[in-house]
Amino acid sequence: MDHSIAIPALVAFFITLILGPGLISFLHKLKFGQFIREEGPESHLKKSGTPTMGGIVFILASIVVVYVLNFSFFQNPYVNLLTFAFLGFGLIGFLDDYIKVVMKRNLGLTPAQKMLGQIVITAVFAFYMVNHSGLGTDVIIPFSGGKEWHLGILYIPILFVVVLGTVNGANFTDGLDGLAASVTTLIAVFLTVIAVGTNAGIHPVICAVIGALLGFLCFNTHPAKVFMGDTGSLALGGFVVSAAYMLKIPLFIPIVAFIYFIEVLSVIIQVTYYKKTKKRIFKMAPIHHHFELSGWPETKVVSIFSIVTAVLCLIGMLAY
């Protein structure tokens, strides 16, 4: 039994489970409640006031396991870069949530401010990937038997597209109780399998996040006692895409994180089509709301999206 898989996951799980009730109570006292948009599904209005920014708890649990407990198997040069993306994008989400729920500005950061912050974090990540990771600019091609594609000068522009797309895809996925956490947990299991199989050395960190997310789901499944907020969803997007780059598999993200991809794509399609025709393709975007308004219970949407992700992760393993 590889203790570097089980121990980080279990410790992070129990830390989250222990800290969760206290954090929820604290957020309640501070009245850090979620603002529910009136243009959203009517069934979501009853969620107004549910504490948000709960992503703090699984971020904290993961970081405690990685750094404070200082297990010997965390001595890996890629760990700091992975946690930089995890925390960096999480910080942008925290600022957005803070402005929304503490300063009572419902829209949080402006789209330009949010994108600027994401571009800065992505630029720093790109710089270190190219200059200090030692991984080069090669990425593995899905279904090629392990062949690599030398991207050269295309590496950085593609990295920006993949990173920003993944981070915002994770953000859009966080719209139903337990959806983002469930989907990301399954993606993280796929990443763990690849990391262990390639001896990349980052699997303890990934396992810590898995354990923390499982603990968070104890409070986040329907009906949710707490939401992760942009603090959590942006951090998860940063975690997934940075881990994929550490493993040289960013081209696998559209496969295993297809739900992220279709969520952000549905928003782009909806907005673009509406601007041109004043008509909507989906009943509501992101696409999980379309299925809700089509009569699916919230729990069914989460279950189906999770099943789709699990199947696609299996396909991703075949593609590797």
Image (tube, rainbow, N blue to C red):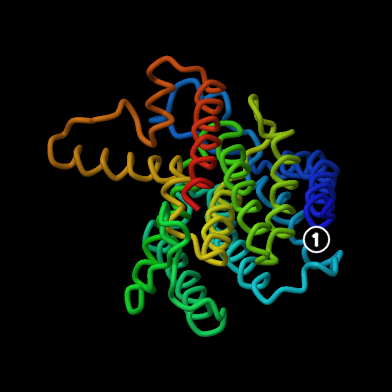
Name which residue lies at 45% across and 57% down: 145
Residue indicated by mark 1: 64
Image coordinates for residue 38, horizontal then vertical, percent: 42, 30
Report x, y in % for residue 6: 81, 49
147 relative to 120, above or below: above
Instruction: Name the foreground residue: 144 vs 79.
Output: 144
Q: Where's residue 147, x and y in %?
A: 43, 64
Query: 131 above or below 37?
Result: below
Answer with left or right where residue 267 lies relative to residue 96. Answer: left
Q: Look at label 1 and name its amino acid.
A: Val
- Along the line of sight, the residue nearer the viewer: 111 or 55: 55
Q: Is residue 167 left or right of residue 71?
A: left
> Crowding at label 1, few (<14), some or many (≥20) Cα neighbours within 10 Å?
some
Is disc 1 placed on a helix, strand or loop? helix
Query: Which residue appears at 62% of the width and 49% of the height?
Result: 188
| Image location of residue 196, percent across then percent down | 68, 57
